[in-house]
């Protein structure tokens, strides 16, 4: 079993910054990729940013230049630095990982979600 523990959400004013963290623990042999998704009320869950084990990153067009994803492979932790936040960034942010378990199978896991609210 694998757990993803997220932290760092909250309320921030437009133009402000937040940093999200997500730590994976449990039966992990190797992590292929980690990423952040978000879901606003009435909307589908969408990819915000992802990063592979080799450090390759991809971003949603709406956050390019404002958000930065990074990871600490030794700690199985991924971070999302969010700058210049806008009200439209308000959503529940979910951490995701695709990994290889000790049993040789690939798995997808999700965090419980952390609320980010951008409002004055």
Image: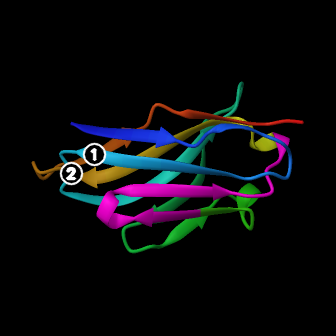
- Density class for disc 2 (Cα within 10 Å; few <14, some 14-19, many ≥20) is some
- Magenta stretch encompasses residue 93: no
Q: Position of residue 36 (x, y in %)?
A: 54, 49
Pointer 2 with pointer 1, Cβ within 8 A: yes
Q: Position of residue 69 (x, y in %)?
A: 56, 62
**76 sits to left or right of 62:** left
Reply above or below: 36 against 110: below
Which residue corresponds to mark 1?
25
**113 sits to left or right of 85:** left
> The magenta stretch spans which residues?
69-87
- Magenta stretch encompasses residue 74: yes
* Residue 108 placement: quadrant: top left
Residue at left offset 58%, top offset 56%: 80
Reply above or below: 91 against 42: below
Determine the residue located farthest toward the top in the rendered image. Answer: 42
Residue at left offset 44%, top offset 64%: 71
Q: Nearer the viewer, residue 36 or 5?
A: 5
* Residue 89 placement: quadrant: top right
Residue at left offset 72%, top offset 64%: 64
| Colour basis | rainbow
Q: For the image shown, how many numbered marks are present on the structure?
A: 2
**2 sits to left or right of 43:** left
Question: Quick one: SS at disc 2?
Answer: loop
**54 sits to left or right of 99:** right
Which residue corresponds to mark 2?
28
- Density class for disc 1 (Cα within 10 Å; few <14, some 14-19, many ≥20) is some
Q: Nearer the viewer, residue 12 or 45?
A: 12
């Amino acid at each position: 079993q694998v757990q993803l523990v997220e932290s760092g959400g909250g309320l921030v004013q437009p133009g402000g910054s937040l940093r999200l963290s997500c730590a994976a623990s449990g039966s992990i042999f190797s992590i292929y990729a980690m990423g952040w998704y978000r879901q606003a009320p009435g909307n589908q869950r969408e990819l915000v940013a992802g990063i592979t084990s080799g450090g390759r990153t991809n971003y949603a067009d709406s956050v390019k230049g404002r958000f930065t994803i990074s990871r600490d492979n030794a700690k199985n932790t991924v971070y999302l630095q969010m700058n210049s936040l806008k009200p439209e960034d308000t959503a529940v942010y979910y951490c995701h990982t695709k990994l290889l378990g000790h049993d040789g199978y690939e798995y997808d896991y999700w965090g419980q979600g952390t609320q980010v609210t951008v409002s004055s």
